[in-house]
Image: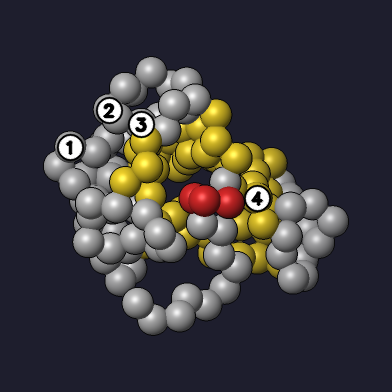
Amino acid sequence: MKKLEGVIVDDAQAKDEGKWTESGAAKKFIGEGYRHDGNTKDGKCTATFTAKLPAAGKYEVRLAYAANTNRAAAVPVQVQHAKGSDIVRVNQRETPPIDDLFTSLGVFEFTADQPATVIVTN
């Protein structure tokens, strides 16, 4: 895979709550693999991704995932930013539009003194 640009936080660096299962069955992913909830859909699993950004400003936030027909169609992803918090729903049954790996969650304003936080919930 080509070198990724920007600020990257892999799922291995995320803070996990609940029972996640490690996998590498999909053909495209970042790092050594990825995690899934084993189709429990109980809302008790979260993965919190935190990044220190190089400067205050507007950043596009992307989420990488391995699409499959057995994935959730409306995964809640919370983006915590300078103006508050937004929930974006991601259909992980559809192939991500950016390099077949990423979907854009949007462009958000961030400050230099607070980390950027993205929380994925099952």
Say left or right for 91 vs 76: left
What whole-number distance in Å separates the C-alpha atoms at marks 3 and 1? 12 Å
Point out the tag, 3 or 1, that comes first from the N-terminus: 3
Query: What's the mark number on residue 70?
Result: 1
Decide: is 24 above or below 18.
Answer: below
Query: What's the mark number on residue 37?
Result: 3
The residue wearing badge 4 is 50
What element does badge 1 sit on?
loop
Q: What residue is rendered at 30% in x and 71% in y?
A: 99
Query: What's the mark number on residue 39?
Result: 2
From the image, state whether disc 3 or disc 4 is nearer to you. Answer: 3
Looking at the picture, tell me which residue is in the foreground, 105 or 100. Answer: 100
From the image, state whether disc 3 or disc 1 is nearer to you. Answer: 3
Looking at the picture, tell me which residue is in the foreground, 107 or 103. Answer: 103
What whole-number distance in Å separates the C-alpha atoms at marks 3 and 4? 20 Å
Expressed as whole percent of the image width and height from the top left, the position of residue 90 reads 35, 44
